[in-house]
Image (cartoon, rainbow, N blue to C red):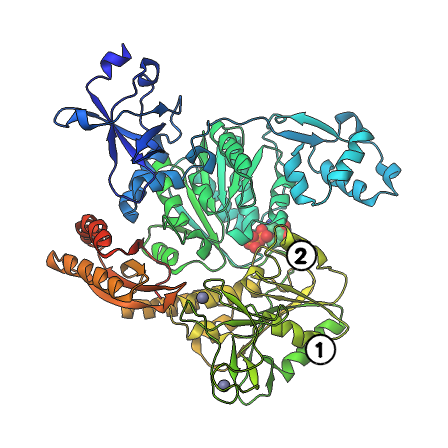
């Protein structure tokens, strides 16, 4: 029957290739498969000389098509769609909005095993727990085995059991202790999961501001709306999320919680786990492909009631969605920076609309886009203006660096301030957003500077490894003793990074442990957790970090936060530099004095009277944001206009230029009123990894107009790129334009 039905039809398939169009195929020969042909299923199709996995996106009438030229689908991979209803609609919208090929968009949304054509099912994972009959036993017999006792303590926090892999990740190196406990009958393995239970543990009594927010947000539960939860650090936003989650769970709904990459810490997950007894799945970059698929399946089946994940979790299917929560909504890690350049915040808002569920955006330092949407009445806003309990916001001091004696980036006064806190047994967090030892190596005699041979950048000196490294392409070489230009031997380190700061602080405070936390010290898997494990609340320590440290982790004994170079953002090249700087400073400031000790924040600056710094000094993010918004309004930048950036690169600069000029000509030939075209211009760092980069910027106050213009050049882009042999990408709503 089905084969007869399917005779006159053509299947439209989105294939994972960088081309905007979809491809037509004939139905597979076997009747059994043909009956399953519904949009959203995966099919394996012949493509060029090989086969690819694609998504069936539509069925058409063979009608006018020259059917005899078409090939048949090789295989139907799914019984039921992997991309259903709202997700299917969302991805179609996203492909059109971001002007990105539908096949790539759809594949980005799927776990990697599904992209490869593996079945959308999970093998049961081994779980471990304390046998229920030993739950109340005294663990004193384990007194001489502290690691085992620690495991028992941890497992008692998870009476429902925990996946063995996850346990091994949380407590690295615990495999032998798991075995020992299992031999003693303290631990049992079981497959699958204990059933979910909706109960949760009680939280603290809410503050008035929290109550208002919770009531307002719960009232919104059954339908779509977007709300900003605007609360300073430590104001209890997480507690508000918890109450909303409880309300959603009580309605039998699932909750999706998105957090920035750096925010997804064991601390946060432990907080969720100790509050909720329901099944919870966590999606982060450390998962294996199998675990990722398992989490995806558990969310889709409804087995997991709470799904927590980073950016790409915005695509996780939910059986009974109730609310979408995006914490630290201003965080740039929500924007995907390669391939399909989506913004998870914007997609979450669209998804909430498709699903008809509320979206909650939380932040202490909301993005200007979101504040603008609040001002226009599109988003609701709930403000948590004060910290909970007795903890107060740290005082922010701006230290004038002009005419000061500065050594390794630190003034004498700063060293004294640090000593004062350390002497009291407290910890100091020093923040510097630049890793390595020095920004460059320079010849004192002729001025030569070590540069990358593949990029227009200076090489960064990493002294400990005796290496010069390019932070763009990864090129590295040993440090030379002589200047290659003048053979002089007076090579000096110029500028400073975290490594140099570490050295300087080790010298200034020989008795104090200095812990450096940046990408160089945390590259290895599990290294970050290990280093954080060395941070001890009971002793003075100095923590040095890049933005890795700016959020997510609580350091209760940190009472002083030092920002070495607060000017970095004030005069940054990108139009978002100052916004980012302010957000970062207030976020790091939020790390200080969160427990019972009052905190202090010191910013070093050569422009201590800068009005933006003055706003930050008063913890007045609202005034800070207003001031920047005013500037953006005057200059017509987002959120007062919409941008799209077309980037291109090639080994030959002329090709890039010719391609982008041809694209600009196309656009100018069919102008859309209100759309301005800027460029092409070379990228801020023109040559990277041996390729020349340039860009074309399109700007319009009218979003629809901008998209009409982009649609007008979409077809030409592919042909022109092929002709000029360049790589190119389209970035709609770019977060950086330099
Ligand atoms: P945020 O997410 O806004 O930074 P948190 O939710 O982490 O703030 O709250 C900061 C601290 O205050 C946490 O230790 C939390 O347990 C506590 N807290 C939150 N709400 C209350 C409340 N209503 N009463 C007492 N303590 C609270
Ligand atoms: Zn020289
Ligand atoms: Zn390089």
Residue 660 point in image, percent of width and height: 23, 61
Is residue 409 depicted above or below 320 in this figure?
below
Binning the other alpha carbons within 10 Å of mark 2 as few (below 14), some (14 to 19) or many (20 upward) gives some
Read off the residue under disc 2. 532
Is residue 529 depicted above or below 350 in this figure?
below
Is residue 495 depicted above or below 311 in this figure?
below
Q: Is mark 2 within 8 Å of ligand 1?
A: no
Residue 161 point in image, percent of width and height: 67, 32
Residue 121 point in image, percent of width and height: 49, 26
Quadrant assignment, res 246: top right
| Of 360 and 416, the residue lying toward us | 416
- Quadrant containing the C terminus is bottom left
- Whether residue 245 is visible, yes or no, is yes
As drawn, the label of residue 278 is none
What's the CA distance linking mark 2 and mark 1? 22 Å
- Quadrant containing the N terminus is top left
**Drawn side of residue 672 relative to residue 730, left or right:** left
Residue occupying the point 67% across, 57% down: 531
- The number of numbered discs placed on residues in the rendered structure image is 2
Quadrant assignment, res 242: top right
Q: Quick one: SS at disc 1?
A: helix
Residue 63 point in image, percent of width and height: 13, 24
Residue occupying the point 76% across, 31% down: 187
Q: Is mark 1 within 8 Å of ligand 2?
A: no
Q: Quick one: SS at disc 2?
A: helix
Read off the residue under disc 1. 507
| Of 261 and 587, the residue lying toward us | 261
Q: Earlier in the sequence, mark 2 or mark 1?
A: 1
Binning the other alpha carbons within 10 Å of mark 1 as few (below 14), some (14 to 19) or many (20 upward) gives few
| Of 52 and 216, the residue lying toward us | 52
**Drawn side of residue 539 relative to residue 608, left or right:** right
Residue occupying the point 30% across, 68% down: 682
């Amino acid at each position: 029957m089905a084969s007869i039905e399917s005779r006159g039809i053509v299947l439209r398939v989105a294939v994972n290739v960088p081309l905007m169009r979809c491809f037509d195929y004939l139905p597979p020969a076997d009747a059994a498969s043909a009956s399953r042909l519904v949009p959203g299923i995966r099919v394996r199709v012949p493509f060029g000389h090989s086969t690819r996995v694609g998504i069936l996106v539509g069925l058409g009438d063979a009608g006018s098509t020259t059917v005899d030229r078409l090939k048949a689908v090789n295989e139907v991979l799914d019984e039921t769609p992997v991309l259903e209803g709202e997700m299917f609609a969302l991805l179609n919208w996203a492909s059109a909005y971001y002007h990105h090929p539908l096949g790539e968009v759809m594949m980005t949304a799927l776990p990697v095993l599904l992209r490869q054509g593996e079945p959308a099912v999970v093998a049961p994972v081994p779980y471990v727990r304390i046998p229920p009959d030993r739950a109340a036993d005294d663990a004193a017999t384990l007194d001489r085995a502290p690691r085992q006792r620690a495991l028992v303590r941890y497992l008692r926090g998870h009476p429902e059991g925990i996946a063995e892999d996850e346990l091994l990740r949380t407590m690295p190196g615990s495999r032998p202790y798991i075995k020992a406990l299992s031999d003693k009958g303290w631990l049992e393995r079981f497959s699958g999961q204990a059933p979910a239970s909706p109960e949760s543990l009680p939280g603290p009594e809410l503050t008035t501001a929290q109550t208002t927010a919770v009531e307002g947000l719960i009232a919104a539960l059954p339908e779509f709306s977007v709300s900003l939860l605007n609360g300073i650090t430590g104001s209890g936003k997480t507690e508000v999320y918890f109450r909303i989650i409880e309300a959603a769970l009580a309605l039998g709904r699932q909750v999706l919680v998105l957090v920035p990459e750096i925010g997804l810490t064991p601390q946060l997950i432990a907080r969720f786990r100790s509050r909720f007894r329901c099944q919870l799945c966590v999606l982060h970059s450390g998962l294996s492909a199998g675990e990722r698929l398992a989490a995806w399946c558990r969310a889709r089946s409804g087995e997991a009631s709470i799904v927590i994940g980073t950016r790409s979790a915005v695509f996780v299917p939910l059986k009974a969605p109730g609310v979408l929560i995006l914490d630290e909504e201003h965080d740039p890690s929500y924007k995907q920076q390669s391939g399909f350049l989506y913004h998870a915040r914007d997609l979450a808002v669209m998804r909430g609309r498709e699903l008809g569920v509320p979206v909650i955006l939380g932040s202490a330092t909301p993005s200007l886009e979101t504040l603008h949407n609040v001002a226009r009445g599109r988003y609701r806003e709930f403000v948590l203006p004060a910290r909970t309990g007795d903890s107060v916001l740290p005082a922010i001091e701006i230290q004038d660096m002009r005419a000061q004696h500065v050594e390794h980036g630190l003034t004498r006064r700063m060293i004294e301030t640090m000593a004062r806190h350390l002497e009291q047994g407290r910890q100091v967090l020093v923040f510097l957003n630049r890793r390595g030892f020095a920004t460059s190596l320079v010849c004192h005699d002729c001025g030569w500077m070590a540069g990358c041979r593949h990029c227009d950048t200076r090489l960064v000196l990493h002294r400990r490894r005796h290496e010069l490294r390019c932070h763009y392409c990864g090129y590295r070489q040993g440090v030379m003793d002589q200047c290659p230009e003048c053979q002089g031997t007076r090579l000096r380190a110029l500028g400073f990074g975290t490594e140099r700061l570490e050295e300087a602080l080790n010298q200034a405070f020989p008795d104090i442990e200095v812990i450096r936390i940046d990408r160089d010290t945390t590259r290895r898997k599990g290294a970050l957790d290990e280093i954080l494990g060395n941070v001890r609340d009971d002793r003075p320590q100095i923590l040095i970090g890049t933005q890795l440290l700016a959020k997510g982790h609580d350091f209760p004994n940190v009472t002083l936060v030092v920002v070495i170079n607060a000017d970095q953002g004030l005069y940054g090249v990108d139009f978002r530099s100052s916004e980012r700087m302010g957000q970062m400073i207030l976020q790091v400031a939020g790390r200080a004095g969160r427990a019972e000790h009052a905190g202090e924040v010191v910013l070093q600056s050569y422009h201590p009277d800068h009005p933006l710094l003055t706003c930050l000094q008063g913890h007045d993010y609202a005034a800070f944001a207003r001031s920047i918004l005013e500037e953006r309004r005057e200059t017509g930048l987002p959120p007062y206009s919409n941008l799209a950036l077309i980037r291109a690169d090639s080994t030959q600069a002329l090709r890039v230029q010719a391609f982008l000029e041809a694209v600009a000509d196309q656009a100018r030939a069919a102008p859309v009123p209100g759309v301005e075209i800027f460029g092409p211009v070379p990228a801020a760092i023109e040559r990277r990894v041996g390729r020349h980069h340039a860009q074309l910027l399109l700007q319009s106050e009218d979003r629809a107009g901008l998209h009409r213009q982009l649609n007008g050049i979409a077809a030409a882009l592919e042909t022109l790129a092929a002709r000029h042999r360049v790589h190119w990408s389209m970035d709609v709503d770019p977060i950086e334009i330099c």
